[in-house]
Amino acid sequence: MSEMVKRKKLGPVARLGVRYGSTVRKRLSKIEVEMKKPHKCPSCGVIAVKKVSVGLWGCRKCGYTFAGGAYTPSTKLGEVAKRASGGTPSEAIKASGKEKEKVE
């Protein structure tokens, strides 16, 4: 009878081994996977955004740098604030330009 060997789950936190507890390792794994996955640029729309530093994200294609969350380029709170303020300044300018064209 062959014994089943319990294998260690590999992932971004495999480097930690058995240290720090399973809950902390799972939480860190979730954060690192979300942070390193490809993100869409809010300016050009291309999936080329990488983390520059804590809270700063930059597009490798168009060079657009913007503030976001520490682990994701956009946070739930940031999306709520954007809705409340009426969007980004560039979107507001575009919208006001369209309204002027309609009025004339």
Image (cartoon, helix red, strand yellow):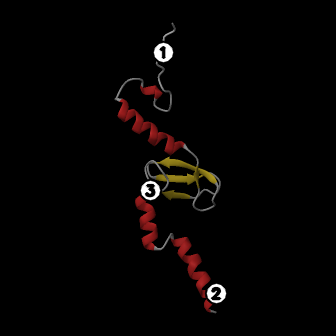
Residue at figure coordinates x 63%, y 88% from the top left: 102
Residue at the front extreme of this rendering? 1
The answer to the question of whether label 2 and label 3 lie on touching residues, with beta carbons closer than 8 A, is no
| Pointer 2 or 3: first along the chain | 3
Give above or below for 5 relative to 11.
above
User: Which residue has dot 2 on it?
Assistant: 101
Q: Nearer the viewer, mark 2 or mark 3?
A: 3
Q: CA distance from mark 1 to mark 3?
A: 41 Å
Q: CA distance from mark 1 to mark 2?
A: 70 Å
User: Which residue has dot 1 on it?
Assistant: 5
Element under disc 2? helix
Three-letter residue code for mark 3: Thr
Give above or below for 50 relative to 25.
below
Element under disc 3? loop
Q: Residues within 10 Å of mark 3 (few under 14, many from 20)?
A: few
The answer to the question of whether label 1 and label 3 lie on touching residues, with beta carbons closer than 8 A, is no
Residue at figure coordinates x 48%, y 15% from the top left: 5
Q: CA distance from mark 2 to mark 3?
A: 34 Å
